[in-house]
Image (cartoon, rainbow, N blue to C red):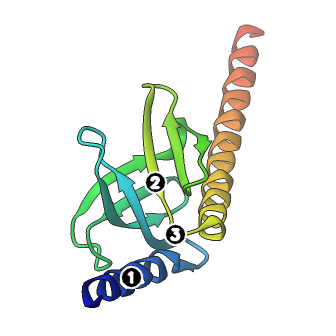
Amino acid sequence: FFVAFKQSMMAAKRIRHLQNITVDDDEITGWLEKQSRHLKQWRERYVVLNKDTITTYKTSQRIKSTEEIKLDSFTILNITPENNFEIKNVSINESIIFRSANDITTDRWLSFIESRIKKIQQVIIQECIVQRDKNRNNDNK
């Protein structure tokens, strides 16, 4: 009985831990689980989403990052009932899978990530338009 109680308390603490998201003007931070690419094991990571990058850390002190993910080539690919969500680097065909505590937390992270990806894509499109117009002007000279 004691072991089962202790395990349920640890699971409840983990869920509360994974539900916390901090939002400010420059970044979104909080705990998610991230699936390792090769061993497919779940590991808790402190996640920082800034304007164009997701950076993961083992601790919230952000001493040494475990991964830095530039969002300029990413899209949101898949969401599962288990609160897993997958983002995919379309340029190299590589996926990264995160897991959160519940639907609300998953939806919040996805909303933030999607918003950042859209802003990045808008900047890229605008840069392409500017470059196209420069090229046209040079061709017309």
Q: Quadrant of the N terminus?
A: bottom left
Q: Amino acid at mark 3?
A: Ala
Q: Is residue 97 above or below residue 1?
A: above
Secondary structure state at the residue bearing disc 1: helix
33 or 68, nearer to the observer = 33
Q: Residue visible at 34% across and 88% down?
A: 5
Label ID, residue 98: 2
The image shows residue 6, relative to residue 56, as above or below, that is below
User: In what element is the residue under mark 3?
Assistant: loop
Reading the image, the residue beneath label 3 is: 101
Q: Earlier in the sequence, mark 1 or mark 2?
A: 1
Crowding around mark 2 (Cα neighbors within 10 Å: few <14, some 14 to 19, many 20+) is: many
- Choose between 103 and 89: the one closer to the eye: 103
Contact check, label 1 and label 2, Cβ < 8 Å: no
Q: CA distance from mark 3 to mark 1?
A: 15 Å
- Element class at badge 2: strand
Q: Residue at x 51, y 69 (%)?
A: 101
